[in-house]
Amino acid sequence: MKNFFKVSFLIALIFLLLSCEKIDRIISPENYEPVKKFLFLYTNDEHGHMWEKEDTYKAVALYEMWEDEVNACPDCIVYRVSGGDNYTGSAISSIFKGESMADVMKFLHYDVSAVGNHEFDFGSAAFFSNRKTSGVKYISTNLLSVNLKPVFPGSVTIERNDTKMGFIGVTTEELKQISYSEFFRKVNVVQSVNSVEREIRKIQDDVDAYVVIAHQSFENSKRWFMPLDEKHSKKPLVVFNAHTHESYKKDVDGTMFIQAGKYLNSYARVIVKKEKGEYKIEKADIIPVKKEIKLSSPESQYIKKFIDKYVIMTSKIAGKKIGNAGRDFTTDEFGKILTCSWIERYPDADLALNNPGAYRDKIVKGSVRKSDIISMLPFENRIVLSEIDGKTLMFNLNLSENSYVGVYKKDNKWFLKNGKEILPDKKYKAVINEFMYNSGDGYRFVGEGITNKMTLTGWREPLYSLLSEKTNKGESLEDVLKDCIKKY
């Protein structure tokens, strides 16, 4: 009988405790919502730099570091994110129209990316093929077709572990001025202020939280972010910035703005914690990608073998030595040599000038191969011969910083190398590239009284020829630079 009462008492006690817990859950449900953590791993402006000339396997190192991040946060819901501009850049990617980088992004399990201004550098077919290969979801709120229909989804919702996380994409409004693709001729770029707000209204009731991936600067992102306080109850947890190649993290009213640099040199790690219904940034860091790789997993070994295959193919296609550098070269110095090769090819011209944004890598001490030139000048461009009035020419020269030969500036006036001042109404012959002719970076080479002739010469070809010729004579890049400065 005693045992009967003991058992009955225990059953009653358990029932009472369960009843109290049930009541307490009804009264205070947030007290019993499990704490959740979210791990965002982010890179931007990768530009195909999965591997570098110094034999650094950046993609392998990133894979290994991201695996360590996931293992260090075993209960985290993980998202792998890119800020866009994935493919054009390093020769190992550019030679193959981004195909190799698309595969690497698949191996790294990227979920979603903003649409950058270089996504279509190899044309529409290459991009859509790369998108399929990578499995990445590309999003942008502010790209509309000519009939005002969205070109890409403005957002995507990823549901994991009973959490709906929204991702909203934004593309730089400068797109048409800084991109080189026929695809974007048929695209309207609208202000991100209105497009982001519209997308927030669309998704905010259907997601638990959201982030914005903005292929634009911090300053431009603030233009749509600052009015959100008055219009929306939920602001983005994080704004991932890109495009400017900077590295920073800035807390603005509880939202973390972060950009991880460029070329897979570093990545951003953001950990968000949800507790009692509130989301808070627990940690945000920018972490350099290691040069050393461990190859301790079959996956990292596979990625290395995959990259090695493309290294070999790149060497066969563009591994020919065409020069020798006794030291590292600055971008300005390389720009002088490049434009010098143009005017050497077209000696009837008065000058040659290039856009500074064209240079995407560096020329370092040692052998200089075709692949190094492709990494420095990854875009496909032809040379254009322009006959232009002095006034417009001087406007264009002021955009070129130091990337020109055949002219110099003194006391705020421009002079040809022979000492004659450039006059506003006189015509001059200039060698430029196709991107500049198409008004890229704000250049003006189309207008009344200006004539242009498109050549069949690729913009790297004269440089290949000049360096090969000088190398055969035993001259280094330093010798080529001295000769260029002396002549032009």
Image (tube, rainbow, N blue to C red):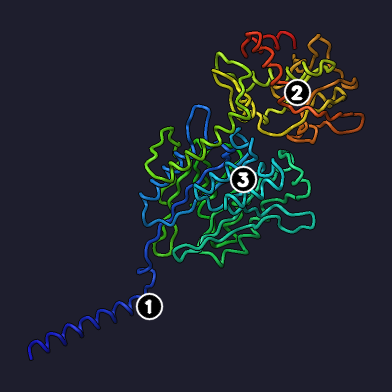
**Furthest residue in direction bottom, as rendered:** 1
Q: Nearer the viewer, residue 306 or 481?
A: 306
Residue 26 - label: 1
Residue 353's label in the rendered image is: 2
Image position of 454 with respect to 424: above or below: below
Q: Residue at x 73, y 21 (%)?
A: 462
Residue 397 shown left or right of residue 42 in the figure: right
Kind of residue at badge 3: His
Asked if disc 2 and disc 1 are in contact, CB closer than 8 Å, the reply is: no
Q: x, y percentage for residue 17?
A: 25, 79
Quarter location, residue 450: top right
Name the residue: 71% across, 34% down: 380
Q: Position of residue 432 (x, y in %)?
A: 78, 26
Local crowd size for mark 3, using a 10 Å CA cut-off: few (<14), some (14–19), many (≥20):
many
Dot 1 and dot 3 residues touching (CB under 8 Å): no
Q: Quadrant of the N terminus?
A: bottom left
Q: Is residue 279 above or below residue 438?
A: below
Find the distance from the CA under tag 2 to the CA under tag 1.
72 Å
- The kind of secondary structure element at disc 3 is strand
Foreground of the two, 103 or 384: 103
Quadrant into which the C terminus falls: top right
In the displayed structure image, the side of residue 158 where residue 39 appears, left or right: left
Please tell me in which quadrant of the rendered image residue 298 appears.
top left
Of labels 1 and 3, the one closer to you = 3
Disc assigned to residue 215: 3
Which numbered disc flags the more N-terminal residue, 2 or 3? 3
